[in-house]
Amino acid sequence: GQKKICVLFGILHIFVGIWKKFTMHPSAWIVSICTALASSVFSFSFETWTVTEHDK
């Protein structure tokens, strides 16, 4: 559950980094959507996953 979502966070950031690296002018809306999704995932899922793993 939470671990998969956190992996998605990493994948989204990698995608944005590659997108910016290989295109001269990346589409602003694609980059904005990906970074917004990644930030949301980080805010909500990472902390939950960390607390869940700590409680085990």
Image (cartoon, helix red, strand yellow):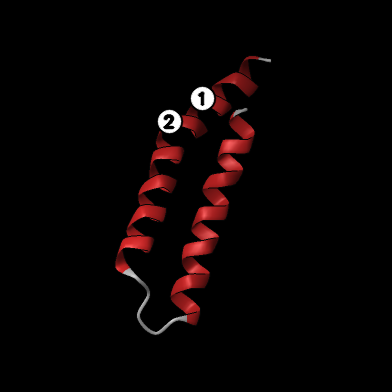
Circle on res. 44: 2
What residue is drawn where x is 52% and y is 46%?
A: 9
Q: Is residue 17 above or below residue 32?
A: below
Circle on res. 48: 1
Q: Residue placed farthest to the top in the image?
A: 55
Q: SS at mark 2?
A: helix
Residue 34 is situated, as x and y percent measured from the top left of the image, at 41, 54
Indicate the quadrant containing the C terminus: top left, top right, bottom left or bottom right: top right
Residues under numbered marks 1 and 2 in contact, where contact means CB atoms less than 8 Å apart: yes
Q: Is residue 51 above or below residue 23?
A: above
Indicate the quadrant containing the N terminus: top left, top right, bottom left or bottom right: top right
Residue 13 is situated, as x and y percent measured from the top left of the image, at 49, 57
Number of on-image labels: 2
| Disc 1 residue type (three-letter) | Thr
Residue 12 is situated, as x and y percent measured from the top left of the image, at 51, 54
Circle on res. 9: none
What residue is drawn where x is 49% and y is 68%?
A: 17
Q: Is residue 11 left or right of residue 30?
A: right
Q: SS at mark 1?
A: helix
What residue is drawn where x is 50% and y is 81%?
A: 22
Q: Is residue 54 above or below residue 29?
A: above
Quarter occupied by residue 44: top left
| Disc 2 residue type (three-letter) | Phe
